Amino acid sequence: MLDNPPEEATSPRRVLVCQYRTCRKDGAEPVLWVLQQQVVENVTVEACGCLGLCGSGPMVLILPDQVYYWRMNPQKVQKVIESHLLANQPIATMMHPRLHPQ
């Protein structure tokens, strides 16, 4: 009998990248572009409006995990792809500290 993978590994994820004013000014367009260039099974990447954390951007929200990554750049995005999206290991040190206190 085949083992089923854990539900969290097969649940579809949405990656939202804020494209509102402040995040765009802080470099959200390249962050979105890098995410859109990667093909990760069961993951969709979308531009979104304000995530309500202006001044902390560029912001990336991963659903349904409810993980908010802040001050993102293309290099950090690559780490999130490899660790969170592919290996299912969120990166605590990159999460917004107000929403994810350590």
Image (cartoon, rainbow, N blue to C red):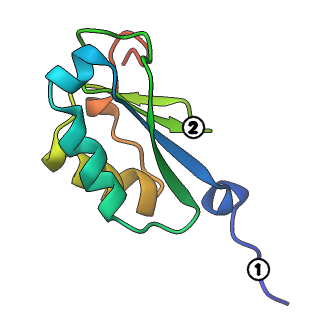
Q: Which secondary structure, mark 1?
A: loop
Q: Is residue 29 toward the left or the right of residue 90 in the image?
A: left
The residue under label 1 is: 3
Which of the two residues, 41 or 90, is positioned nearer the viewer here?
Answer: 41
**What residue appears at the point 25 percent right and 27 percent down from the top-left corner?**
58
The amino acid at mark 2 is Asp
Tag 1: Cα neighbours inside 10 Å, few (<14), some, or many (≥20)? few
- When the figure is inspected, residue 16 is found, relative to residue 82, above or below; the finding is above
Q: Outermost residue toward the front?
A: 21
Percent x, y of residue 32: 30, 44
Please give the residue where the numbered disc 2 appears in the rendered image. Answer: 65
Extreme-bottom residue of the structure: 1
Res. 97 mark:
none
Q: Is residue 67 left or right of residue 9?
A: left
Comparing labels 2 and 1, the label whose residue is closer to the camera: 2
Amino acid type assigned to the residue bearing label 1 in the image: Asp
Q: Residue at x 34, y 33 (%)?
A: 92
Residue 57 seen from this side: no
96 relative to 11 in the view: left or right: left
**Residue 92 appears in the figure:** yes
User: Vertically, is 69 above or below 85?
Assistant: above
Residue 97 lies, in percent from the top left, at 33, 15
Residue 77: % across, % down? 25, 47
Which residue is painted at 65% across and 54% down in the image? 8
Q: Secondary structure at mark 2?
A: loop
Q: Pick the quarter of the image with the C terminus.
A: top left
Q: Quadrant of the N terminus?
A: bottom right
Identify which residue, 2 or 20, lies in the foreground.
Answer: 20
Q: Quadrant of residue 87?
A: bottom left
> Which one is earlier in the sequence, the residue at label 2 or at label 1?
1
